[in-house]
Amino acid sequence: MAVETVSAALTLKDIAREAGVSLATVDRVLHNRPGVRPDTVRRVQETIARNAFHPHVAAAELARGRARRFAFVMPTGANPFMQQIEAYLGEMSAWLSARRLSVELINTDVFDPSVLAASLETLSGDYDGVAVVALDHPGVRAAINDLVDAGTKVVTLVSDVPSSRRHHYVGIDNIAAGRTAGALVGRLVGEKPGKVAIIAGSQGLRDHAERIFGFNQVMASEFSRLDILPLLEGRDDDDRSEQLISRLLDKHPDIISLYNVGAGTQGVAKALTEAGREKQIVFIAHDLTAMTRRLLLQGTLDVAISQNPGHEARAAVRVLLSLARNEPILSEQENIRIDILMRDNLP
Amino acid sequence: MAVETVSAALTLKDIAREAGVSLATVDRVLHNRPGVRPDTVRRVQETIARNAFHPHVAAAELARGRARRFAFVMPTGANPFMQQIEAYLGEMSAWLSARRLSVELINTDVFDPSVLAASLETLSGDYDGVAVVALDHPGVRAAINDLVDAGTKVVTLVSDVPSSRRHHYVGIDNIAAGRTAGALVGRLVGEKPGKVAIIAGSQGLRDHAERIFGFNQVMASEFSRLDILPLLEGRDDDDRSEQLISRLLDKHPDIISLYNVGAGTQGVAKALTEAGREKQIVFIAHDLTAMTRRLLLQGTLDVAISQNPGHEARAAVRVLLSLARNEPILSEQENIRIDILMRDNLP
DNA sequence: CTGTTAGCGCATTCAT
DNA sequence: ATGAATGCGCTAACAG
């Protein structure tokens, strides 16, 4: 009936005895520290492997003594999605403090590359790990690489800098998210012909650009019968987005779907409602907030494509911790999914 | 710039000194053990609260010495979804062993209530925690309650027994999953009138029954123009499902959508393809496996509604561990979502 | 290059 | 009802 067996709970000392060396030598091998004869290294490694030995993390953590410090560099301002991530970090505080981990929030203008880069530079040496909502820019890339060179573990959060040497990216594949939006638009409008509107914050933002790219890809290859209107840029601002969309709806009575790539969903929704067309137009936007939740329940918004902010907060912390401990990371666990949220599967 | 402050990393000893008692007394209060004057208890608790003190889990774990044993009671047989959960448990083995945790798999016929109940009874006393894919039946409920009374922590996995006193349920809300399926069918078929077919493993299975309930709810209230055909029961078997669906497709040339509530998706897909109708019919099924992934990419399957087996495996372990340690559980983290998976957001 | 040793913070006897 | 003392398994500093 039982399948797995219980392993005998070995300790470093057991390994040391079996390999015929001292505790300290096993420890050196375990952490690839210098000063051990290659031959001895091999012998110890073999005993470790043979016994499938894993050092007790609790003991290791305790013996290290030193607490770990992580910094989260987040955008200033009232972006609700970022606020959710910060809130979930706050919820972890008991968990963190029971592990002698500290997370410090650093709010910076992440949209100004020089400010962000400068902000990152000041962190060097003070932290074991840094999570940053990054802007893809040469200055930022350099700052990230400097941190990495200084021995700090770095993960990019939500927005990546693939060309940097960051250790990990915690966030979604935005091209795939855009493709998902495109497929949903195409599938939900049915057979009807008509125009599709698309509004983003700015094409200069990497995540927005990638989503637009993925969206257009799917529309061109699979729903070419639909007419995509030129991209509008609402700068993630409610009022501006509302105005742009209002004008657009006036001009095109045959719009059947609307995709909002970035923030400003409230403004877009307002324009839709005031035109009295919220039920006819398939409306797709990003992220789950109190507001998009309400819009989904009302039926104004048809789908919210989202990334789970709680998952991102915890994944970033866990990845930084694993990196700091030189532990392997459970990649399946830290992979952030593209959530399709509709009225009936709201969490 | 910085927002959170680093707490001073207190220890039990600090609390003891500040409260004017010994280490042992603080420990007693911390674990609600008897033998402390109420007055002293209060004083110690206040000091703990005032300092927002959290005992170092690593030290606690180390001092306990004793390893924790958990059992996972899973269905025998070749259910791919269950096999995925087991596989993810296997992937955690290094993680588990580094924490001196052991997970033992117990395979049982969970569909026979008396066998399952008997199986659970044998576990009593041997484990700190038990996760069980449960069948909702009085005998099983009693067995679960007995385990709980014996001090074992119990979580139900994937399939719940709400009337039992299990400590936690790790799995999705199946009514909501059924509603989600219904909404997707209704939205994806467009304006077309026609018939909708539905096939389940068995109405006797609680999760199937709940999904059917949710599905019908949405169809009746929002898509009453669609004609729902009587439920078929394929017993989660590919061949039987294929035969049933083939016959149904022959009989009804105007079927526009098909919802498979349980397993047997491969058989259903085969029937669809052999009838040459896989492109016209909106097909929705559950769970992501190698096969449903392929069907999604081919376009035979339009949506897979799924629960993340890796997440479920890890959540069950974490919840059992938190329960065993008397730690609070991060409910947002352990909540299992209803995933809507389409071709473009496959993980 | 290798070994010895003193804690890390808590749980748990055993005394008082 | 309370306190003192021991050790969990590992890291890090030091000694050879």
Image (spheres, coloured by chain):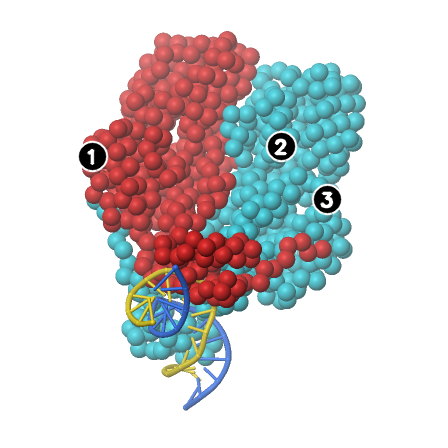
Chain colours: A cyan, B red, C yellow, D blue
The front one of B172 and B138 is B138
Q: Is residue A341 left or right of residue B334?
A: right
Query: Residue A43 occupies which quadrant of the picture?
Result: bottom left
Q: Residue at x 49, y 56 (%)?
A: B43
For label 2, the residue is: A290
The front one of B239 and B222 is B222
For label 1, the residue is: B115
Residue type at the position of mark 3: Gly
**Image position, residue B291 (x, y; %):** 39, 33
Q: Is residue A318 visible?
A: no
For label 3, the residue is: A77
Q: Residue at x 76, y 55 (%)?
A: A114
Give SS at disc 2: helix
**Label 2 chain ID:** A
Residue type at the position of mark 2: Ala
Give SS at disc 1: helix
